[in-house]
Amino acid sequence: MRLIILEDAGVVADWAARFVLQRITQFAPGPGRHFVLGLPTGGTPLGMYRRLIDFYKEGRLSFKYVTTFNMDEYVGLPRDHPESYHYYMWNEFFKHVDIDPGNAHVLDGNAADLVGECRRFEELIAAAGGVHLFIGGIGPDGHIAFNEPGSSLVSRTRVKTLAYDTLEANKRFFGNDISKVPRQALTVGVGTVMDAKEVMILITGVHKSLALAKAVEEGVNHMWTVSAFQQHAQALFVCDEDATLELRVKTVKYFKALSEEHQKMIDGVPVDEQRVLH
Ligand code: PGA
C-alpha cells in the first residue's frame, strides 16, 4: 500500500488526474483493447474530472477506447434527477469527453429486477476483462462505494441499505432534508473493487481523518470497509494534509519521505520500474 500525502484537495485532484493520464497512456488503448476504469461520484473526485476534461481538450488524452464502470447509484431516484449518479457522471464528465456512452456503465437504480441488475453489472465487468484501475472515495465512516460499516469484505455488487451517517453526510445534496435522501443504493462490493488490478482511493478533508487512520494504521476491519485495501497488491491512498490529522507522526513522516518516488508515478516512469519501489 502506498499513502501519498499532498498539500490540499486541489493538488490531490491534479495528482489523481495525472495518474489516470499516465496509466491510460502507458496502456495504449485501441480497437479491441480498452482500458477499463472504475469511477466514483461525490464531491471528492470533481476536481479530478475537471483536470481529465482539460487533458482531453488539450489533446493529451482520449477516452475513445476506455470503458468505465461506476461504483454505485441510488435506488429509485429518476435518472434525470440532479442528484442521481447518472446525471452527475454525464454532466460532470462524460458529456465533456469522447467516451462512447455505450461503454460508460452506471448501475440502473430503477431496474425492475435490482438483483438481476447487480448480477448483470458483475457480468459486464467480467466480459470487459476486469477493471485496470478502480478509483474510489470514502465516507467519514470509512465506507468505500456504499459498502457501509459491517459489509462483507468479499461482497459483490448488490442492493444496500444506507447507514445513518451516510444519509447525514449526503443530505447536503438534498436541500439538507434527510428524508429526501434515498434509503437504498446499488453498489459494487468490496470484493468487486478488490478484483481490480490497481485501486486509487482519494481522501480529503479533516472529516475523513479518522477513517484514514483506521484504514491505514489499524487492522482490516469490516466496520471500516476501506481498510480491506491494505490487502490489495496495488492500492494507493491519495490524501491531503487535513486528512492526515489522526495519523501518527511516524506514519506521516515515513510516507512523506517517499514523495520523490510518488512524483515519479505521474512523471512518466514505466509501470514495471514503479513496481520495484513497493
Ligand atoms: P464525498 O463522498 O466525496 O462527497 O465526500 C465520498 C463517499 O461518501 O464515498
Image (cartoon, rainbow, N blue to C red):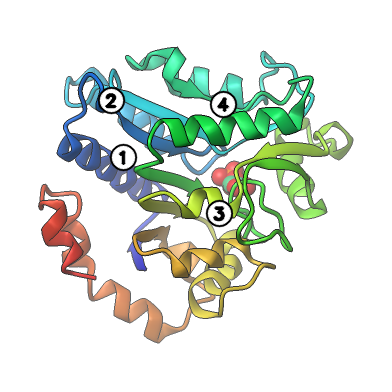
Mark 2 neighbour density, 10 Å: few (under 14) some (14–19) many (20 or more) = some
Check disc 4 and report the residue beneath it: 106
Of residues 167 and 148, the one nearer the viewer is 148
Q: Going from the N terminus, do you reach mark 4 or mark 3 first?
A: 4
Q: What's the residue type where badge 4 is placed?
A: Val
Secondary element under disc 4, as helix, strand or loop, is loop
Q: Going from the N terminus, do you reach mark 4 or mark 2 first?
A: 2
Q: Percent x, y for residue 188?
A: 60, 43
The reply to whether residue 146 is visible in this rendering is yes
Check disc 1 and report the residue beneath it: 17
Q: Quadrant of the N terminus?
A: bottom left
Q: Going from the N terminus, do you reach mark 3 or mark 2 first?
A: 2
Q: Going from the N terminus, do you reach mark 4 or mark 1 first?
A: 1
Check disc 2 and report the residue beneath it: 54
Q: CA distance from mark 2 to mark 1?
A: 10 Å
Q: Going from the N terminus, do you reach mark 2 or mark 1 first?
A: 1
| Residue 176 horizontal side relative to residue 242, left or right | right
Q: Percent x, y for residue 121?
A: 57, 31
Name which quarter of the figure residue 48 lies in. top left
Q: Is mark 2 within 8 Å of ligand 1?
A: no
**Mark in the foreground, 2 or 1:** 1
Q: What's the residue type where badge 2 is placed?
A: Asp
Secondary element under disc 1, as helix, strand or loop, is helix
Q: CA distance from mark 3 to mark 2?
A: 32 Å
Name which quarter of the figure residue 183 lies in. top right
**Mark in the foreground, 4 or 3:** 3
Q: Percent x, y for residue 51?
A: 32, 32
Which label is found at residue 191?
3
Residue projecting furthest to the right? 179
| Residue 260 horizontal side relative to residue 146, left or right | left
Q: Going from the N terminus, do you reach mark 3 or mark 1 first?
A: 1
